Image (cartoon, rainbow, N blue to C red):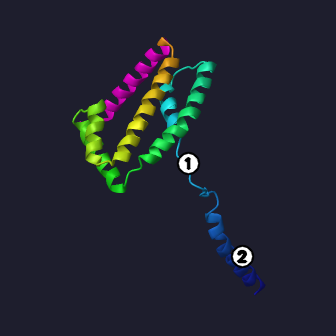
Amino acid sequence: MKTARVWLTLAAALLIASPLLAGEGKKKKGPPKPPPCPAAVIVDGMVKGLTLKDDQKKCFEELKKEFGPKLMKAIEEAKLTPEQAKARKEAEKEAKEAGKKGKEFYQAVDAATKLTEEQKAAFAKRRALDKELRGKVMAELTDEQKAEMKKIAEEAKKKAQEKKPK
């Protein structure tokens, strides 16, 4: 009788503890991560794979701090409705498939998205900031780094083409 009571107690303890043990090791969900700084995404993407000098690294960090808030504000101002976002995604796909690039690409996408005047201004502002940031990054790079950047971009393009289904 005493043995049965011990076994019953152990079984009850195991039943109580098993849900707690099952949850152990799982990551706890905390607050959502903030979106990455758009300036950091642009700069880091441009210089990925390059060997940078300390003064260049410092300059790029300053550019991220300068352009990050400006780009975030422009992104917020250009907020799309869910319908616009869907239309934009489809228009981007169609424009890429049609081989459109640059200004022609953006005109086709913007027309399909049916942007308001405020959104058009915000997108134009964002593109201008993006262009200015990219220009400043390129101005800081040496000719050798620019050549290496071009080589990395060509290799990435080649890999992307190889992955495309035929």
Q: Which mark is residue 34?
A: 1
Report the residue marked by disc 2. Answer: 10
Helix, strand or loop: magenta stretch: helix
Q: Is residue 26 rendered to the left or right of residue 1?
A: left
**Label 2 close to label 1 by CB (< 8 Å):** no
Residue at coordinates 60% horizontally, 29% vertically from top-left? 62
Instruction: Inspect the magenta stretch and tell me whether residue 162 lies in it.
Output: yes
On the image, the x and y values in percent for residue 151 come to 41, 19
Q: Is residue 97 rendered to the left or right of residue 70?
A: left
Secondary element under disc 1, as helix, strand or loop, is: loop
On screen, residue 149 above or below 120: above
Q: Quadrant of residue 28?
A: bottom right
What is the quadrant of the C terminus in the image?
A: top left
Residue at coordinates 34% horizontally, 26% vertically from top-left? 158
Instruction: Inspect the magenta stretch and tell me whether residue 141 lies in it.
Output: no
Q: Tag 1: residue type?
A: Pro
The answer to whether one can see residue 53 in this image is yes
